[in-house]
């Protein structure tokens, strides 16, 4: 019995109405007892009642103090607020629709912003020594070009003359029409120099990456992303050496990138 009463003090929502009735009855008994003592001191019945209220000060404040002493008062307040809110929402279906849509848009926007911040600022780049990587552009400010793509001859000169970097690579984003046997689709890829993969510390999952000879001879070879290889070619481990068509030009598959490697931008896979 003592354990049950103690649990009621911890969890007042078990019998809230009974507890409120007990509180009112106890306060009323205190008032009556105080009024009787005031009457015994020589006050009239009306004066004794006023004196009893003054002695107990603010009855409402006493009730709130007692409820707070029960503990978990905030749970009762929360439940009351929730019940009130639900009643209001049932009366205004248009309001609840607007409220839900507003919350959905707010949550979606926050999620998108956090995903961008996480990918760009918080999560480290999945490359070797990411803090030592730099990206540079050519520029022609007199003509209004703050960033301009570098030409191949310029890159060769920079690579030959520079003494600040241990390695130098180049890439250019490009969309291709993939039209080997099967449904054609538009994929995002990149033309990269042979030095990109070793510079970033990436080893292929299958096959190999590009050679310097293929760089200079402009050979049509391709390294597939893991996602495209798995989705379109079913993870076929014999894909190396096969030919696929990009912009109606045959390219020989020489390798498959590891799952974690996405460079420079993730495209359709």
Image (spheres, rainbow, N blue to C red):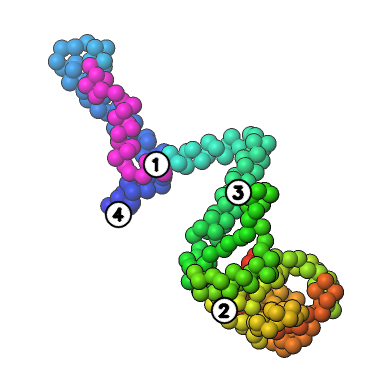
- Point out residue 266 in the picture as x, y percentages from the top left corner: 66, 66
Q: Is residue 7 above or below residue 249?
A: above
Classify mark 3: residues with Cα within 10 Å, few (<14), some (14-19) or many (20+).
few
Which residue in the protein does label 1 denote?
74
Q: Residue furthest left?
A: 41
Residue at image x 17%, y 21%? 37
Q: Is residue 152 magenta?
A: no
Question: Is 106 left or right of 3, judged from the image as shown?
Answer: right
**Numbered disc in front, either 4 or 1:** 1
**Numbered disc in front, either 1 or 3:** 3
Classify mark 2: residues with Cα within 10 Å, few (<14), some (14-19) or many (20+).
some
- Point out residue 54 in the picture as x, y percentages from the top left corner: 24, 19
Q: Nearer the viewer, residue 65 or 31?
A: 65
The mark found on residue 109 in the picture is: 3
User: What span is in magenta?
Assistant: 51-75
- Cα–Cα gap, marks 4 and 3: 49 Å
Question: Which of disc 3 and disc 4 is earlier in sequence?
Answer: 4
Residue at image x 27%, y 28%? 29
SS for callout 1: helix
**Numbered disc in front, either 2 or 1:** 2
- Cα–Cα gap, marks 3 and 2: 38 Å
- Cα–Cα gap, marks 1 and 3: 31 Å
- Point out residue 188 in the picture as x, y percentages from the top left corner: 72, 67
Residue at image x 29%, y 40%? 69
Which residue in the protein does label 4 denote?
3
Q: Nearer the viewer, residue 96 or 119?
A: 119
Question: Which of disc 2 and disc 4 is earlier in sequence?
Answer: 4
Q: Is residue 185 above or below residue 16?
A: below
Which residue in the protein does label 2 denote?
198
């Amino acid at each position: 019995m003592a354990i049950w009463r103690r649990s009621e003090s911890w969890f007042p929502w078990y019998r809230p109405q009974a507890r409120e009735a007990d509180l009112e009855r106890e306060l009323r008994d205190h008032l009556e007892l105080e009024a009787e003592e005031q009457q015994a001191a020589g006050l009239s019945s009306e004066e004794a009642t006023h004196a009893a209220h003054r002695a107990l000060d603010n009855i409402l404040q006493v009730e709130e103090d007692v409820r707070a002493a029960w503990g978990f008062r905030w749970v009762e307040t929360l439940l009351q607020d929730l019940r009130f809110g639900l009643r209001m929402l049932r009366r205004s279906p248009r309001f609840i629709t607007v409220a839900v849509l507003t919350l959905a848009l707010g949550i979606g926007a926050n999620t998108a912003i956090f995903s961008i911040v996480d990918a760009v600022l918080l999560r480290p780049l999945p490359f070797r020594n990411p803090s030592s990587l730099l990206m540079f552009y050519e520029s022609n400010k007199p003509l209004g070009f703050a960033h301009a793509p570098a030409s191949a001859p310029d890159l060769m000169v920079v690579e030959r003359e520079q003494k600040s970097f241990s390695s130098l690579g180049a890439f250019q984003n490009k969309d291709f029409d993939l039209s080997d046997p099967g449904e054609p689709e538009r994929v995002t890829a990149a033309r990269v120099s042979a030095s990109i993969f070793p510079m970033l510390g990436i080893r292929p999952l299958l096959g190999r990456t590009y050679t310097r000879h293929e760089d200079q001879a402009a050979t049509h070879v391709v390294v597939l992303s893991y996602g495209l290889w798995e989705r379109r070619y079913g993870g076929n481990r014999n894909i190396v050496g096969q030919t696929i068509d990009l912009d109606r030009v045959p390219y020989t598959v020489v390798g498959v990138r590891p799952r974690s490697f996405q460079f420079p931008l993730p495209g359709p896979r």
